Image: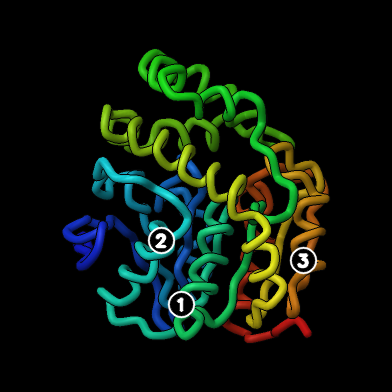
C-alpha cells in the first residue's frame, strides 16, 4: 500500500507507512516505543479474516517520516486520527501494544466519536504509578541519550529485547531488531525515538492526575491482555488500569512477557477476533 500523507497542524505533510489486510470492520494496530507496523505479522492475516486491519508506523518510527518535532501522546494520537481520516475511516477499533496502549487511550479521550473499542496488549497507561526502568530514565537524559544511541550495537538491542520475553525465541528477537534497521537507527530515527521517550515521560510525570480522572470516565469497551511475567509493564499496573475502567476486562497469560501477540499469538488472535469483530463487550 502507498504511504498516507497527513494534513494539518504539526503533522502536515508527514508520511505514514502502513500495511493492511482483510476486509470488514476497521481495526488499527498501534505499536509501542521502538515498534513498527510489520511487528504485527503474527496477527494481521488472522484478524484480516473478519476485519480490515491496518498496522501503521507511527511518526518517527519504522519507515514513516521522522520530523524533528516534539513527540507526546497527544501528537501520536493525532497521527492515528489523521491516518484514519486519510483512509476514510469514521469508526475504528484500536489495538495498542505497550506505549501504543496509552496512545489508543488518548485517541479515545480526544476523539471519542472515532474509537469504538480498545484492546490493550502489555499496555501502559498514564495516571497509574508507572515508572520507566532505570535504563530508560538514563537514555531520556539529554546528551546521555544521544551518546548512547549513537554507539549502541545490535547485540545490546537483542539482549534488551530478549529480556522482554518470558521464553525468548531467537528468530523473533532478530526480526524485531533487524527489520528496517537502517531507517530505524538513522540519525533522524534516533532523534525521534529520544524525543518520544522524553515527551511521553513528561505526560506520565505531569499529567498523571488528569489522565487518571479521564480514564475513569472513559465509556468504551476495553479488553486488556497481559503477560503475568511481563518485565516491562508489571501485571499490577494492568490490574489497576482495568479496575479503574467503566467497561474494562482483563485476560491473563501465564509464561508470557511483554509481547503477548507474539509469545501466544494463537490465543491472543482468538481473543482479539472475538472482542473486536464478534463484538463481545465487557460490562
Image position of 9 with respect to 188: above or below: below
Q: Kindly identify which residue carries mark 3.
A: 242
Rendered location of residue 26, percent (x, y): 43, 79
Is 105 in front, or is 235? 105
228 vs 271, left or right, is: right
Q: Are marks 3 and 1 in contact (CB under 8 Å)?
A: no
Q: Are marks 3 and 2 in contact (CB under 8 Å)?
A: no
Is 10 in front, or is 84? 10
- The 10 Å Cα crowd at callout 2, few under 14, some 14 to 19, many 20 or more, is many
Rendered location of residue 170, percent (x, y): 57, 29
Q: Could you say whether the residue bearing mark 1 is in a helix, strand or loop? A: loop
- The 10 Å Cα crowd at callout 1, few under 14, some 14 to 19, many 20 or more, is few
Q: Kindly identify which residue carries mark 2.
A: 55
Q: Of circles 3 and 1, which is in front?
A: 1
270 vs 151, left or right, is: right
Q: Could you say whether the residue bearing mark 3 is in a helix, strand or loop? A: helix
Residue at 27% over, 27% down? 187
Q: Of circles 1 and 2, which is in front?
A: 1
Name the image quarter holding residue 84: bottom left
Residue at 53% over, 74% down? 108
Image position of 119 with respect to 260: above or below: below
9 vs 181, left or right, is: left
Q: Could you say whether the residue bearing mark 2 is in a helix, strand or loop? A: strand
Q: Of circles 3 and 2, which is in front?
A: 3
Q: Are marks 1 and 2 in contact (CB under 8 Å)?
A: no
Quadrant of image for the N terminus: bottom left
> How far apart are the alpha carbons under marks 3 and 1?
21 Å
Residue at 67% over, 73% down? 222
Rendered location of residue 149, percent (x, y): 41, 21
Could you say which disc has been placed on residue 111 in the image?
1
Amino acid at each position: 500500500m502507498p504511504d498516507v500523507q497527513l494534513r494539518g497542524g504539526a503533522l502536515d505533510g508527514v508520511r505514514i507507512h502502513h500495511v493492511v489486510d482483510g476486509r470488514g470492520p476497521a481495526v488499527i494496530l498501534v505499536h509501542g516505543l521502538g515498534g513498527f507496523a510489520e511487528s504485527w505479522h503474527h496477527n494481521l492475516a488472522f484478524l484480516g479474516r473478519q476485519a480490515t486491519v491496518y498496522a501503521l508506523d507511527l511518526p518517527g518510527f519504522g519507515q514513516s517520516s521522522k520530523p524533528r518535532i516534539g513527540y507526546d501522546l497527544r501528537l501520536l494520537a493525532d497521527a492515528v486520527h489523521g491516518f484514519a481520516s486519510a483512509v476514510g475511516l469514521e469508526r475504528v477499533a484500536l489495538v495498542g501494544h505497550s506505549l501504543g496502549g496509552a496512545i489508543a487511550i488518548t485517541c479515545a479521550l480526544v476523539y471519542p466519536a472515532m474509537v469504538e473499542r480498545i484492546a490493550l496488549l502489555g499496555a501502559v497507561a498514564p495516571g497509574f504509578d508507572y515508572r520507566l526502568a532505570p535504563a530508560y530514565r538514563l537514555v531520556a537524559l539529554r546528551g546521555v541519550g544521544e551518546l548512547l544511541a549513537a554507539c549502541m550495537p545490535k547485540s545490546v538491542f537483542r539482549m534488551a529485547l530478549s529480556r522482554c520475553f518470558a521464553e525468548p525465541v531467537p528468530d523473533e528477537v532478530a526480526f524485531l531488531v533487524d527489520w528496517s534497521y537502517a531507517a530505524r537507527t538513522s540519525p533522524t530515527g534516533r532523534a525521534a525515538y529520544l524525543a518520544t521517550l522524553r515527551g511521553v515521560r513528561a505526560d506520565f510525570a505531569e499529567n498523571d492526575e488528569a489522565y487518571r480522572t479521564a480514564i475513569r470516565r472513559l465509556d468504551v469497551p476495553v479488553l486488556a491482555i497481559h503477560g503475568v511475567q511481563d518485565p516491562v509493564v508489571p501485571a499490577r499496573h494492568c490490574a489497576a488500569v482495568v479496575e479503574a475502567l467503566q467497561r474494562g476486562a482483563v485476560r491473563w497469560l501465564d509464561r508470557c512477557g511483554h509481547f503477548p501477540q507474539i509469545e501466544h499469538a494463537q490465543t491472543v488472535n482468538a481473543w482479539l477476533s472475538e472482542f473486536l469483530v464478534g463484538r463481545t463487550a465487557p460490562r
